[in-house]
Image (cartoon, rainbow, N blue to C red):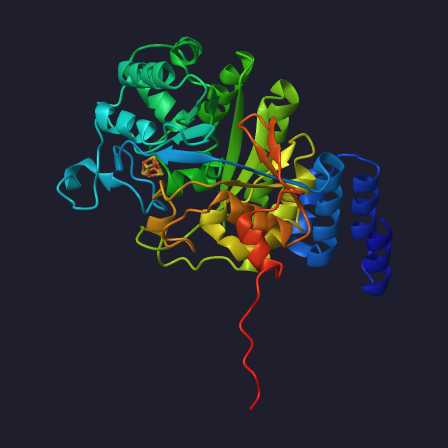
Amino acid sequence: MQQVELLLKNKGLGAEHRQIAEKVANQQRISPEEGLFLFEHGDLAFVGVLANIVRERKNGDNTYFNRNFHIEPTNLCVYDCKFCSYSRLIKQRSDTDAWAYTMEEMLDMVRRYDGHPVTEVHIVGGVLPQYDLPFYQEFFRKIKAHRPDLHVKALTPVEYHYIFKKGKVTYEEGMRLMQEAGLDSMPGGGAEIFHPEIREQIAADKCTAEQWLRIHEVWHELGRRSNATMLYGHIEKFWHRIDHLEQLRQLQDKTGGFQTFIPLKFRNQDNQMSHIPEGTAVEDLRNYAVSRVYLDNFDHIKAYWPMIGRTLAQMSLAFGVDDIDGTIDDTTKIYSMAGSEEQNPALSTHELVEMIRRVGRRPVERDTLYNVVQDYTDTVFEEDKQWRGYIDLPVVQAQ
Ligand code: SF4
């Protein structure tokens, strides 16, 4: 709190700042009004310090990553979300950018990682009628039959709502069938912005906020875990973000099933919202920090490095973030097609560890459920020896 006191004094920050700081220090929850104040008027350094207090209280210096790869079954989609740079409508099927993999092709992608120490496959993509309930049941079963230890983190309520409706099963029955087939956990996508004023403009035809939240709730009731996201920085106002965070906080109070909150930055390349400018890095950092402070019942805040780039991901670790996702291995196109910093996202374990170390944090490889796979604090990689001057650099002698 010393840092907070200094900031309050040196910057002449007023009573609202002090009141929020005292709440955070005393581990009390901030109100929606206070959250809004932090977004609208909070001093950036102050918000960052508060977020860091919460981050270190929950996770110390630990900064998590995992070794994973993605499978994106198709980018054809029956929906038409305005911010989506990735999907191709079914009528554009001849588009050379479009793909729709067969089950065998996707199983080949899984087999490609045989013998590699990956712990998770992340499966998400467009919504198409042929990728239905029986298809995914079979796909998950086959993955598990081939590699039982691989954690299947797959599909969002956007897909589940569609395939359950088509399969004429309830959410409860559908999620139970998915669990039986081998689904281990659910990623956080498809949340966008919950408030109908925004959702109806950017993602009118897919599942509603209530449906998204209910499917997560049903999954949590089965004793399983999931993540949550928020697509920010487009046409929403700060209060829409607070409304979104509040709905997540309330569901988490009820179920405790969310692990991680992942803010997703709006990118404006090649989509129907390209006229809307992207937010700045400062606003990204503020968003991480306010989210960290607001979601006091979430254990983790993740910065998705392919979306914001490595530099900002490193900076985010001082603004409440304790997780920077995984190695990914260039297996996702969702953000690269939207103009993200990383066009071919892939990092080796060594590179991820080094990114974390360079900002003074503790690199910890986790599995999907945050069990520690390896703590890299004292690991010396062969490549590290070069960084640390173990090899002689050529010296040019002055004549
Ligand atoms: S965001 Fe998802 S649901 Fe919406 S159009 Fe893109 S792929 Fe389809």
Q: State which quarter of the image contains the C terminus.
A: bottom right
The answer to whether residue 223 is left or right of residue 346 is right
Residue lying furthest bottom: 399
Q: Using the rendered image of the protein, determine whether residue 221 is visible from the camera's viewpoint.
A: yes
Q: Position of residue 350 (x, y in %)?
A: 53, 46
Q: Nearer the viewer, residue 391 or 213?
A: 391
Whether 383 is drawn above or below 299: the answer is: below
Q: Which of 123 and 106 is in front in this view?
A: 106
Whether 332 is drawn above or below 11: the answer is: above
Whether 329 is drawn above or below 177: the answer is: below
The answer to whether residue 201 is left or right of residue 131 is right
Q: Position of residue 198 (x, y in %)?
A: 45, 42
Q: Position of residue 59 (x, y in %)?
A: 70, 36
Indicate the quadrant of ligand 1 in the picture.
Answer: top left
Q: How many labels does the image show?
A: 0
Quarter of the image where one finds residue 114: top left
Question: Residue drawn 35% across and 40% down?
Answer: 331
Question: Residue drawn 16% across and 45% down?
Answer: 95
